[in-house]
Amino acid sequence: MAMLEDTDLTLTGAAQGKMSELFAGIEEGIAGVRVYAAPGGCSGVSFGMTFTDVINDNDGVRDFGDYKVVVDDGTLTYLRGVEIDFIDRGDGQATFVFNNLPSTGGGCSTCGSSSGGCS
């Protein structure tokens, strides 16, 4: 396990607040939230998050006090320098988005989404 720095992955104030809120109601045994990569999206990779109860040897961790963000080293190669934000439009449409995603080529000629999906 390695400790991640701001240059590896950042969370906006809104994202940090929402994570703290989510973890306030979480049961014991949850180690953090895992950010993962999956095939798809404009860069050929899309990202998601899920709660995890395991931190592996090949994981990088950002400790925010109330919670930890966990990223395996394979996913970190795609995420380095990315900012996670939380957007609440006020109409029930609230979501985490990934800003500053690197362009590695992939499925679309243009992308209108900061979350890695194509519009």
Image (cartoon, grey):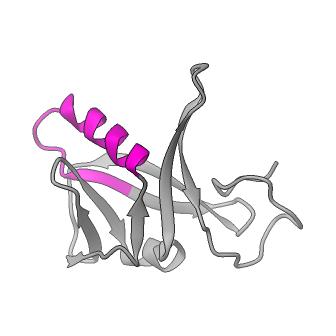
Task: From the top left corner, tell me how far across and down residue 15 is, in percent.
Answer: 41, 46
Q: Is residue 37 left or right of residue 28?
A: right
- The answer to whether 3 is drawn above or below residue 34 in the figure is below
- The answer to whether 90 is drawn above or below residue 81 in the figure is above
Residue at coordinates 28% horizontally, 33% vertically from top-left? 21
- How many dots with numbers? 0
Residue at coordinates 31% horizontally, 76% vertically from top-left? 5
Q: Is residue 7 left or right of residue 31?
A: right
Task: From the top left corner, tell me how far across and down residue 63 is, in percent.
Answer: 20, 62
Q: Is residue 118 left or right of residue 2?
A: right
Image quadrant assignment for residue 12? bottom left
Task: From the top left corner, tell me how far across and down residue 82 is, in percent.
Answer: 51, 68
Give the position of the N terminus as an image quadrant: bottom left
Furthest residue in direction right, as rendered:
109
Q: Of 98 and 33, which appears nearest the observer?
A: 98
Q: Is residue 16 magenta?
A: yes
Furthest residue in direction front, as rendered:
13
Q: Is residue 81 magenta?
A: no
Task: From the top left corner, tell me how far across and down residue 46 is, in percent.
Answer: 61, 59
Residue at coordinates 57% horizontally, 20% vertically from top-left? 92
Q: Of 36 and 87, which appears nearest the observer?
A: 87
Image quadrant assignment for residue 87? top right
Furthest residue in direction top, as rendered:
91
Residue at coordinates 46% horizontally, 71% vertically from top-left? 75
Residue extent of the magenta highlight: 13-34
- The answer to whether 84 is drawn above or below residue 43 in the figure is above
